[in-house]
Image (cartoon, rainbow, N blue to C red):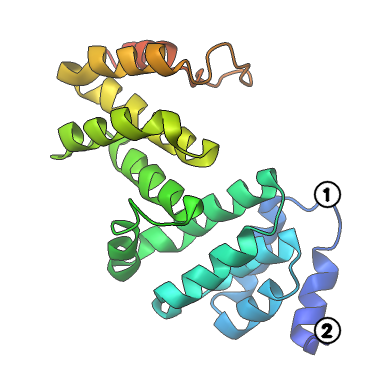
Amino acid sequence: MKFSTKAENVLTQISDKNTKLGDLRKIANGIKKDHDLAMELWSSKLFFARQLAILIMDKKLLTEKVIDNLVSGINQHNEKERLQLIDWLMANQLTKDKKTIALIESWEDSQSSLKRRIYWYYQGRLRWTGQPQTNNEKLLSIIESKIEKEDPEVQWAMNFTTGWIGVYEKKYRNRCVALGEKTGLYKGKMVSKGCTPEYLPEFITIESNKRNL
């Protein structure tokens, strides 16, 4: 595939396997917003190029059809890259505009597991700041009925949401801990130094104690 000179220049800067997120952000800051370039970089199917593309997309042009095409492309990557790209897309673009947030909120029952992950990860991110939410009871009931049958990438996001409900909502804490004990998700999983275990009984205890909740 033949790329424009602009795209070629960018691609030569990020072809190294040692490219870091900081490098991508520096390049993106120099480009600012360039949706056409973003789509051209995306068409390369290269991981770093797609990460950079996400940073310079125009969120106003992210219709559901465009997002579906992005998700389809992300699904072609290996698991590690796939999850990094979908979470990167959510954090850097989809949560930045009311229109795309409205789309996220419609994806609870999407046929795409990555879109369901975005829905649940977004719910968790709403809660990790401690801002009160009114639909915790409803979400917990859904999680309790679905989490054990969900795809792993969605299970993680559901578990994440449950954890933060348990931390900040004391009336649901025992229920969230019990769910973690029932599913056993992430029990015994090693985490990096300074990180909190993802197993709900441990996560909720540690994070609530940090905040004296």
Res 5 visible = yes
Q: CA distance from mark 2 to mark 1?
A: 24 Å
Q: Is residue 11 left or right of residue 123?
A: right
Residue 126: give x, y in percent of width and height.
30, 43
Q: Secondary structure at mark 1?
A: loop
Q: Quadrant of the N terminus?
A: bottom right
Residue 106 image point, x, y percent: 29, 59
For label 2, the SS is: loop
Local packing at callout 2 (Cα closer than 10 Å; few below 14, some 14-19, many 20+) is few
Where does the image place residue 55, in percent across and percent down from the top left?
Answer: 56, 65
Where is 10 relative to 6, above or below? above
Displayed quadrant of residue 99:
bottom left
| Neighbourhood count class around disc 1 (C-alpha, 10 Å): few under 14, some 14–19, many 20 upward | few
Dot label at residue 184: none
- Numbered tag placed on residue 1 in the rendering: 2
Residue position for label 1: 18
Query: Is residue 89 placed above or below 161 in the rendered structure?
Result: below
Q: Nearer the viewer, residue 157 or 195?
A: 157
Residue 188: where, in percent of width, then height?
58, 11
Q: Amino acid at mark 1?
A: Asn
Given residues 172 and 116, the one toward you in this image is 116
Report the residue at 83% width, 49% height from top. Answer: 18
Q: Is residue 132 visible?
A: no
Q: In the displayed structure, would residue 66 be above or below residue 91?
A: below
* For discs 2 and 1, the disc positioned in front in the rendered view: 2
**Residue type, label 2:** Met
Name the residue rendered at 73%, 50% in the picture: 20
Q: Quadrant of the C terminus?
A: top left
Which residue does the image show at 54% across and 54% down from the upper left? Answer: 86
Q: Name the residue: 75% across, 73% down.
A: 44
* Labels 2 and 1: the sequence-earlier one: 2
